[in-house]
Image (tube, rainbow, N blue to C red):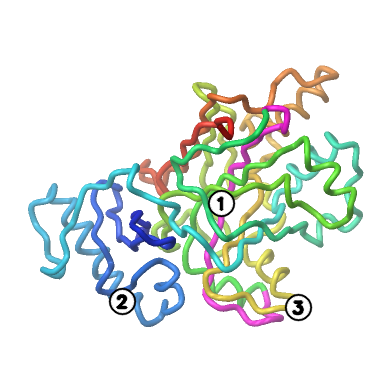
């Protein structure tokens, strides 16, 4: 099933169930108030949400002529302008670097060596989860000199995970998959990391896709721990890349979650990011500008591509094996604060 959030007068919005082709949706108010409410009671509400999913898919198949769901609910056409992030705010958002090819390139750009245990000990930080930006909401900054960069990633949303859970146990607690743009301010990151406490100012609010899906929506592209599909990133009309999210993934979601749960439990609704999707095959392109700049430096001695400028638009999307958009698109403009 596909779930989303329609904006209303509350911070958490209204939970909706969306048709597979993203054309129609129906409020889930009879089942759960918002997505966090549904995640908190996942075992209890799953069956009823699945019934709504079946009904809205049938409704779309008949082009809106047959509604077989509850009579109290009225399906509606999906309007991206009305949608918030799939999960507008979360109790916990952690992001990692699951792809070592990305870590290697970004560290080269900063003149920093790779850790000796890089292949066994994932890098992870805890980001701002009090709000995720809506998928078509602009990102606003004081200056272009901050080094504004996109980072296209996948993410999972979990049920409760106890402290010390194994990777196998963590995999069983993944209930939803989604997509994020983990915007980074590259000019601020080096000085922050020198302090030894990690990212803060260099990691502003993250943007989340309009829809989160249950793993079965991914079909054979999901193996319980990773998604083997292309993640396509555009900067305006230029395609930055389409790396396959299943390739070159050193730490899959089960491993990242087990690392996060090593010393503490993870509450229902925890969002775990994969890190910037990155392939060693350079012909696949990139999911962030920092990688492109580093490749240019290696090949030509210096970067020729700028970071994002005001007025530019970034678009991120992933299509399924059937060619249809899975999570909807993140499409946002970079703008000044005022």
Dividing the image into 4 quarters, which one contains the N terminus? bottom left
**Residue 52 in picture, x, y percent from top left:** 24, 67
Labelled disc at residue 154: 1
Label 2: how many Cα within 10 Å (few below 14, some 14–19, many 20+): few
Dividing the image into 4 quarters, which one contains the C terminus? top right
- Residue at image mark 3: 263
In the picture, residue 81 is in which quadrant? top left
Which residue appears farthest toward the left when viewing the image? 65
Q: Which secondary structure lies at badge 2? A: helix
Q: Nearer the viewer, residue 9 or 113?
A: 9
**Which range of residues does the magenta coloring cover?**
144-166
What is the C-alpha distance between the residues marked 3 and 2? 33 Å
146 within the magenta span: yes
Callout 3 touching callout 1 (CB < 8 Å): no
Q: Looking at the image, is 189 positioned above or below residue 174?
A: above
What is the C-alpha distance between the residues marked 2 and 1? 25 Å
Residue beneath the point at 69% across and 47% down: 203
Left/right placement of residue 22 relative to residue 297 reads left
176 within the magenta span: no
Q: In the image, which is nearer the foreground, mark 3 or mark 2? A: 3
């Amino acid at each position: 099933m596909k779930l989303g959030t329609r904006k209303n007068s509350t911070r958490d919005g209204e939970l909706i169930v969306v048709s597979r082709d993203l054309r129609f949706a129906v409020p889930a108010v009879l089942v759960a108030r918002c997505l966090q409410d549904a995640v908190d009671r996942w075992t209890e509400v799953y069956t009823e949400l699945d019934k709504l999913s079946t009904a809205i898919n049938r409704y779309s198949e008949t082009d809106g002529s047959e509604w077989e769901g509850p009579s109290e609910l009225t399906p509606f056409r999906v309007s991206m302008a009305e949608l918030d992030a799939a999960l507008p705010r979360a109790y916990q958002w952690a992001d990692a670097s699951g792809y070592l090819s990305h870590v290697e390139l970004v560290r080269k750009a900063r003149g920093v060596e790779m850790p000796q245990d890089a292949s066994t000990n994932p890098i992870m930080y805890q980001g701002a989860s009090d709000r995720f930006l809506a998928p078509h909401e602009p990102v606003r900054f004081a200056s272009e000199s901050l080094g504004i960069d996109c980072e296209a990633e996948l993410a999972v949303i979990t049920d409760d995970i106890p402290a010390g859970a194994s990777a196998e146990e963590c995999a069983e607690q993944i209930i939803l998959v989604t997509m994020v743009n983990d915007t980074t301010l590259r000019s601020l990151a080096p000085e922050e990391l020198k302090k030894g406490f990690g990212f803060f100012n260099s990691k502003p609010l993250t943007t989340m896709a309009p829809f989160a899906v249950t793993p079965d929506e991914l079909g054979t592209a999901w193996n319980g721990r990773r998604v083997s599909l292309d993640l396509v990133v555009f900067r305006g009309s230029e395609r930055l890349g389409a790396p396959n999210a299943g390739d070159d993934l050193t730490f899959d979601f089960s491993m990242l979650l087990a690392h996060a749960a090593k010393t503490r439990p993870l509450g229902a609704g925890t969002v775990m990011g994969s890190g910037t999707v990155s392939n060693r095959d350079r012909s696949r392109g990139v999911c962030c500008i920092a990688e492109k700049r580093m490749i240019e430096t290696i090949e030509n001695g210096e970067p020729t591509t700028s970071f994002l400028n005001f007025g530019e638009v970034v678009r991120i999307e992933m299509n399924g094996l059937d060619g249809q958009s899975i999570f909807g698109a993140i499409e946002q403009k970079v703008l000044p604060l005022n």
